Amino acid sequence: MTQSLEGKVAIVTGAFRGLGRAYAEALAKEGASVVCADIRYCDDTVAGIVRAGGKAVAATCDVTSMEQCQAMADLAMERYGRIDILVNNAALYADMKGGKFDQLEPAEWQKMLDINVTGMWHCCKAVIGQMRQQQSGSIINISSLAAVYGFPFGVHYAMSKGAVIGMTRAMAREVGRDWIRINAVAPSAVMTEGTKEFFGERLDRAAGVIAGGQALQRNLETEDLTGTIVYLASDASKFVTGQTIMVDGGTVFL
């Protein structure tokens, strides 16, 4: 079977574990060379890709730092000579502090903005010049069901993921003339390490409530997302831009 991303270069942020790691592995399986970036060093992710016959390199990157995001993009150019795909997956989720919106600390609100919104903007800024030069590229921004469904006691998270959708639409209109596509993917809660840490002892009850609200009543696993990511990264979606694809088992319909 032909690999749909042969010869392409991808950057995946938040690739240390969970969905980010699954995205990196899926893109590599389809032939892409992958820069696996995270605030934690992604040596295990890279080793797994290499063992499977793929190409990957690790980059340590705090997305709140424009300098580190630029260094991540520079590494991709030094190793592979181009940047075709950016998956903006890094986000504050497992470690976030929830609560009633009027009792959230300003520092927690700002931290959410810095990572989930400004961090994504930094990553886009870091790669867009090279994509413009190539006159091609696909940026995939990870939003969330929380943005459109509503997430009580996590309004700062829902707000940040709503901003991702707005940013995706505005940027898509701006860079379409350069044949760069920007789309968003909005999953429901996926049974990753981060989700399990966030819900803690409430996990079983939360998982049941989430699945019960879906048309397809099963909790999402990482492999339920990777097909959508590969599709948006590949030429199969070459005329799709500015869209938000809900991968939520049929919780909401846009």
Image: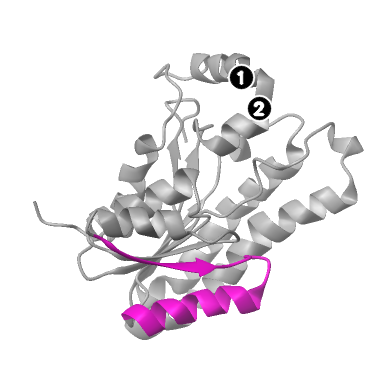
Indicate the position of residue 149 as horizontal and vertical percent values. Answer: 60, 31
Residue occupying the point 49% across, 47% down: 17
Q: What numbered label is drawn on residue 163?
A: none
Residue closest to the eye, 169 or 22: 22
Q: Which residues are magenta?
A: 54-80
Q: Which picture quadrant has residue 237?
A: bottom left
The span from disc 2 to disc 1 (Cα, nearest Å) is: 7 Å
Q: Is residue 60 magenta?
A: yes
175 sits to left or right of 201: left
Residue occupying the point 65% across, 40% down: 94
For the residues labelled 2 and 1, say whether their Cβ atoms are less than 8 Å apart: yes
Residue 146 visible in the current orientation: yes
Residue closest to the eye, 244 or 105: 105
Residue occupying the point 39% across, 46% down: 22
Q: Which picture quadrant has residue 95?
A: top right
Answer above or below: position of 109 versus 117.
above
Q: What numbered label is drawn on residue 199?
A: 2
Residue occupying the point 65% across, 43% down: 93
Q: Is residue 81 magenta?
A: no
Indicate the position of residue 45 as horizontal and vertical percent values. Answer: 41, 54
Q: Secondary structure at mark 2?
A: helix
Residue type for callout 2: Phe
Answer above or below: position of 79 versus 64.
below
243 sits to left or right of 38: left
Q: Secondary structure at mark 1?
A: helix
Which comes before the other along the chain, label 2 or label 1? Answer: 2
The number of discs equals: 2
**On the image, numbered disc 1 is attached to which residue?**
206
Residue type for callout 1: Ala
Answer above or below: position of 230 versus 187.
below
Residue closest to the eye, 180 or 43: 43
Q: Which picture quadrant has residue 146?
A: top right
